[in-house]
Every structure is written in C-alpha cells, then in structure tokens.
C-alpha cells in the first residue's frame, strides 16, 4: 500500500466520521444537516472547463463541457453520501478530470436527499436527467457513473428503465464504485459485518438504519430502490465495479454478480485490499490514480 493510501486511511480514522454513522438516528441526522450546510450545488468560477446549469424537476444539475458545443458522448455522474449527504466543491475537480480524460461531457445532478425526501424523488431526478441527455447525445452515447449511493443510482437508472417500462436505450457503460444498498440476505449482512472493523469510514450500523430514512415514511417504495441488486438489468451490456476488499460495502459484490449473471450482463471488477471506501473517486494517491485511469479507459470505449 502506498504512503498516500495509508495516510488517507489514518486521517479518516482520526476524523471520527465512522462514529457518526453509529449515532442514534436523531443525533445522526443532526450531524448530517450540519455537514450539509456547506454542501450542495456549486457553480465553479474557474476556466478549467465550460460550465452550465440545467433545471431537472426543480433540482439543479451542473454540466461540465470541454467546449461551448456538446461533445459526442456524455457521462451522467452521481455523488455518494448514503442518500443523505450532499456534494462538496471537491467533487468538481473529479468531474473536470473525468471530462478531460474521457472527452465526454459530464452531467452532475444535485438530486433530492432523503433527509427531506423519499428515495423515489432522487430516482425521478436521475431518470429525467438521463432522458434529457439521450435527447441531446442520442442512444448509446450516455454512460452512468457514481460512487457509494451514487453507484447505486448509476445502476438504478437501468433498473428503473426496466421496472417502469419506459423503454429508453440502456446506458452505453455503467461504472459503480463501491455501490451501496441495504443488505437483504444473511450472506450479505455477514460479509458487511465481517468488514466493519477494517472500514475506516462506513459503519455497518448505518446500513441497518438507512432504509427507514430512504423510505421517508412510505411503504410503497420499489424493492430495487432500497436493494439495487434486486433490480432487473436485462438489456444492459456491461458494468464495471470497483471495491476495496476492506470496506463494509464489499459485502454487496456477490449479490451484484449474481444479478448480472442472471440478466446476461458482462461485469468486470477491480478490487484492492486496505483501501478506503470509494477510493477510486479520490485520484490523489497511486492506487486511486491507477484505478481511476482504468475506469476512464472503460468509459472511453
């Protein structure tokens, strides 16, 4: 493991963020709302790219382009945060890097969070954003990508397309870095619990409480929105997964592999031991840079 990977792991452990995930629900939500005061939609003022904004069902979506005119292809990119924590300014650096390395435009919706909304609202925005992008870039020219809960949404666009019978063309590629879901079988729960001590960031206790928050008082939420590996991925060509074998969400991998095998989806997996949760979307140390470049090559295909 590189010095940078070790240093980041130690810094995250020292930050105490993992302890927040195991707080009682009311205290945890108070901490989340405090964090979100300095998060949300951000319009960059630099000249690293051409920035624009779209309104998608009353949610703001940042559009990153390399030129004034749209590129041939685009990536719909979803941030993570357990469906509760919003994006920060640091996400923009990754968006610009992704646009430059792939040559694609990158759309970044600030989807509704489950602190105030049901997860169905996040899916509505994600899917409408995808529909709008297909109208601009055309069938087969839009990929989905995300990390953590954003990885679940990147997969969820395809599952939602099948569940609703919308009949839209499937994403060109899907990249999901440490995709999250509420565990739904004993094997998944056991694997998550086994990695709880080695995960510097996410606590298994959060995986046990987040379903109630995602439902936001509703009992009619489709299963695949809570447990994305239960989704129907028929028609999807390929998916690229990235995991740390030391993270809690590594426990989801076998469910996803089974779902993709069932639905005839080609799946590639990149995994490394000792890395922090969603490490590949923090391309600032050797291992994360290498695996970020790997997913860039995948999205360029």
Image (cartoon, helix red, strand yellow):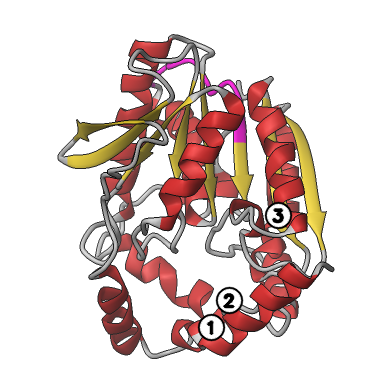
- The image position of residue 96, as x and y in percent, is 47, 38
- The image position of residue 43, as x and y in percent, is 26, 44
Residue 288 is marked as 3
**Distance of label 1 from label 3 (alpha carbons):** 21 Å
Mark sitting earlier along the chain (1/3): 1
**Distance of label 1 from label 2 (alpha carbons):** 5 Å
How crowded pointer 1 is (Cα within 10 Å; few <14, some 14-19, many 20+) is rated as some
Dot 1 corresponds to which residue?
18
Residue 149 visible at all: yes
Q: Is residue 171 magenta?
A: yes
Residue 285 is marked as none
Q: Residue at x 75, y 79 (%)?
A: 194
Dot 2 corresponds to which residue?
201
For label 1, the SS is helix
**Distance of label 3 from label 2 (alpha carbons):** 16 Å
For label 3, the SS is helix
**Mark 1 or 3, closer to the camera:** 3
> Which quadrant of the figure contains the C terminus?
top right
Q: Dominant secondary structure of the magenta stretch?
A: loop
Left or right? Give the position of 233 relative to 31: right
Of residues 114 and 190, the one nearer the viewer is: 114
Q: What segment carries the magenta color? A: 166-174
């Amino acid at each position: 493991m590189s010095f940078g990977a070790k240093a980041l792991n130690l810094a995250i452990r020292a930050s105490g963020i993992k302890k927040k995930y195991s707080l009682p629900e009311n205290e945890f939500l108070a901490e989340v709302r405090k964090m979100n005061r300095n998060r949300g939609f951000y319009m960059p003022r630099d000249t690293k790219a051409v920035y624009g904004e779209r309104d998608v069902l009353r949610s703001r979506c940042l559009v990153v382009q390399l030129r004034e005119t749209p590129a041939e292809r685009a990536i719909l990119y979803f941030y993570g945060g357990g469906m509760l924590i919003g994006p920060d300014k640091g996400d923009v650096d990754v968006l610009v890097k992704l646009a430059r390395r792939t040559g694609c435009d990158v759309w970044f919706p600030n989807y509704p969070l489950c602190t105030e909304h049901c997860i169905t609202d996040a899916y509505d925005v994600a899917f409408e954003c995808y529909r709008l992008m297909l109208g601009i870039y055309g069938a087969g020219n839009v990929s989905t990508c995300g990390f953590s809960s954003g990885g679940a949404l990147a997969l969820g666009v395809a599952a939602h397309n099948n569940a609703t019978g919308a009949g839209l063309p499937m994403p060109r590629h899907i990249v999901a870095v440490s995709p999250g879901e509420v565990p739904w079988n004993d094997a998944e729960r056991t694997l998550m619990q086994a990695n709880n001590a080695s995960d510097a960031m996410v606590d298994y206790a959060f995986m046990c409480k987040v379903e109630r928050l995602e439902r936001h008082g509703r009992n009619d939420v489709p299963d695949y929105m809570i447990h994305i590996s239960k989704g129907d991925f028929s028609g999807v060509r390929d998916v690229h997964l990235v995991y740390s074998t030391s993270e809690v969400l590594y426990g989801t991998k076998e469910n996803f592999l089974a779902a993709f095998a069932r639905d005839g989806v080609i799946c590639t997996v990149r995994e490394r031991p000792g890395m922090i949760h969603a490490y590949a979307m923090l391309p600032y140390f050797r291992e994360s840079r290498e695996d970020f470049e790997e997913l860039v090559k995948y999205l360029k295909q």
